[in-house]
Amino acid sequence: MSGSASDYSVHESAYVDDGVVVGKGTKIWHFSHILKGSRIGQNCSVGQNVVIGPDVAVGDNCKIQNNVSLYKGVELERGVFCGPSCVFTNVINPRAEIERKDEFRATKVRRGASIGANATIVCGHELGEYCLIAAGAVVTTNVPAYALMVGVPARRRGWVSRAGEILGPDLVCPRTGERYREDGPDRLVLIEG
């Protein structure tokens, strides 16, 4: 583990393996385990009963709620929110009697994305920046930036702003006034903000 104990906090019931990098201001809560080779950025919150690693990258300012496991192959960019008990898979077709560790598929979660409670992210996909995955949704495809994904399997039901507000037909964020425009059937871009 790198950094000094005064740079970040680890609850006495949590365990951080040797060779883990933890950024300044990060808090690791009860009964969590950070496995070797993992890197956690600055000012992150790692909730209770969270497992990260081995070899997982978590960007700055991420919030990982209780009962989340981030397996090898998962990468969270800056500012990602993982809701309680959301699930990341690491193989497509698991079997208890067949080892498939050489078949792990990467999952990249882009900056500012939010994943709701009990959502499932099937491995091998990318979640676009600032997308919002609804609670309980099951993501089985790549997700566009700013997409609001709902259901099983998850489908795009609209757009959200960087602030997480659902956008109306005018594509203006009601919280910030940022303006967006559609640039194709599944592409939204920020034009003013």
Image: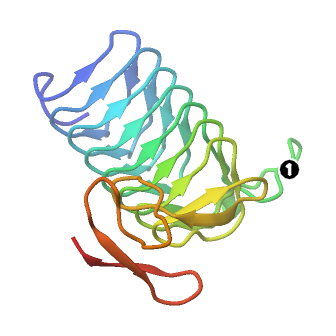
88 and 144: which is toward the camera: 144
Placement of 193 over or under 191, stated as above or below:
above
Q: Secondary structure at mark 1?
A: loop
Above or below residue 14? Residue 111 is: below
Q: In the displayed structure, does residue 71 sit left or right of residue 178?
A: right
* Residue 71 picture location, percent across and down: 56, 46
Residue under label 1, please give it.
98
**Residue at 15% across / 36% down in the picture?**
24
Picture quarter with the C terminus: bottom left
Q: On the rendered structure, is 145 left or right of 107? A: left
- Left or right: residue 38 versus residue 149 is left
* Residue found 40% across the figure and 17% down from its top: 14
Dividing the picture into quadrants, the one containing residue 22 is top left
Q: Quadrant of the N terminus?
A: top left
Which is nearer the eye, 64 or 161?
161
Residue type, mark 1 in image: Ile
Taking the view exactly as shown, the residue that stands out farthest to the top is 12
Residue 155 % position (x, y)? 70, 64
Q: Which residue is painted at 50% across and 81% down in the image?
A: 187
- Residue visible at 46% across and 20% down in the picture: 48
Tell me how the rendering is colored.
rainbow
Q: Residues within 10 Å of mark 1 (few under 14, many from 20)?
A: few
Q: Position of residue 91 (x, y in %)?
A: 72, 56
Total count of labels: 1
Q: Nearer the viewer, residue 163 or 102?
A: 163
Identify which residue, 127 or 131, lies in the foreground. Answer: 131
Quadrant in the rendering for residue 142? bottom right
